Amino acid sequence: MALQSMVAQTIDTTGQEAQYDACVKRLLSEKIILAWILKECVDEFKRYSVKQIMKDCIVGKPNLSVAAVDQDEPDRIEDGGSADETVDGKMEGTNTEDNSVREGKVYYDIRFAAVVPDTKEPVQLIINVEAQKSDKTPYPLIKRAIYYGSRMISAQKNTVFVNSHYEKIRKVYSIWIQMNVGKEKANTITRYRIVEEQIVGHVKEREANYDLITVLMIRLGSAETADRPILRLLDVLLSAETESDMKKAILERDFDIPMTSAMSEEANIMCNLGEGIREQAYEQAMQKTWLQAVLNLMKSLNLSVEEAINALCIPEEERQSLLERIDEELTVK
């Protein structure tokens, strides 16, 4: 019974976290949000307005968890979704796969093509936006980000260019939005890119020929302490604490972003899920604390389980689940 209870709780928590992640991705995939990110973080779009970027620069509909990251893995095209459409009408990532073989596959959170208008030669970019719940990963997140960017370059073989036409390679951006980071990192933006360095002599290469990959790390914090518009926008948009009505007011007043019914619904769901996840995390932490306290009392004072629980004044409603965990712990030992 105890094991079933723990498994059910884990499944419930995992399901809520997955729904929360999906809400975050859908909010970020809104064209007006992507336009703000391009305007504030991508050099090629700094001189354009958010409205012009929405209208003229974002090509087609952004793909949401469709394009596979790893080599030779097919993309996921379903429910009317489309592959990346480029400004010249080509389609990238046209492979499909059956639902049953998707287990364990990794997809870009959001990926889309963008074009810089009013240029002599068409400047086309491939943009990837990733949402990361925190910077607590078992590997340096920057290495994963560089891998994603590198894959977006290598995947252009036989889609954007064929044979040895490397001159057609398009620049890629991988933009990582991290939530729940430490105070020292909060509300920061860091850029990583290829630059030319003269070691011996002075030979200049055209920048467009080597400036092919840029990684941006956007680390969120409190909206009150953000000193860049994009940081405050994302702080507000992705906050699980800020109520939907408050988000709507701030986004419309400060960023001229109309909160559509779809966005409002996602924001509501995200706030509710966030509250549920926090409550479950608190309950699990309290259960763990009580468990250890009971075991310590039993060992140090030679008390029974009931005597230890009574001594700690543990609430009646928490005792049954705690007794199950203690029983499991003692059985394992």
Image (cartoon, rainbow, N blue to C red):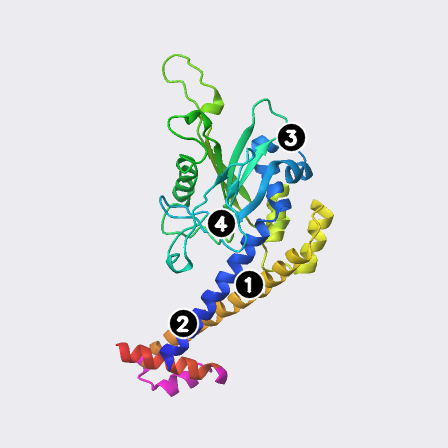
Query: Which mark is first along the chain, 2 or 4?
Result: 4
- Residue 122 part of the magenta-drawn span: no
Residue 287 in the image: above or below residue 52? below
Name which residue type carries label 3.
Arg
Q: What range is drawn magenta here?
A: 299-317
The answer to whether mark 4 and mark 2 are in CB contact below 8 A is no
The answer to whether mark 1 and mark 3 are in CB contact below 8 A is no
Name which residue type carries label 4.
Asp
- Say which quadrant the N terminus sits in: bottom left
Image quadrant of residue 93? top left
Residue count near mark 1 (Cα–Cα under 10 Å), binned few <14, some 14–19, many ≥20: some
Q: Which residue is mark 1?
A: 274
In the rendering, at what x and y percent does residue 167 appear? Answer: 44, 25
Q: Secondary structure at mark 4?
A: loop
Q: Which residue is mark 3?
A: 47
The answer to whether mark 3 and mark 4 are in CB contact below 8 A is no
The answer to whether residue 294 is visible is no
The residues tagged by marks 4 and 2 sit, at their Cα atoms, a distance apart of: 34 Å
Query: Which mark is first along the chain, 2 or 3?
Result: 3
- Residue 304 part of the magenta-drawn span: yes
Between 10 and 164, the one nearer to me in the picture? 164
Residue ranking furthest to the left: 333
The residues tagged by marks 1 and 2 sit, at their Cα atoms, a distance apart of: 21 Å
Mark in the foreground, 3 or 4:
4
Mark in the foreground, 1 or 4:
4
**What is the number of the mark on residue 109?**
4
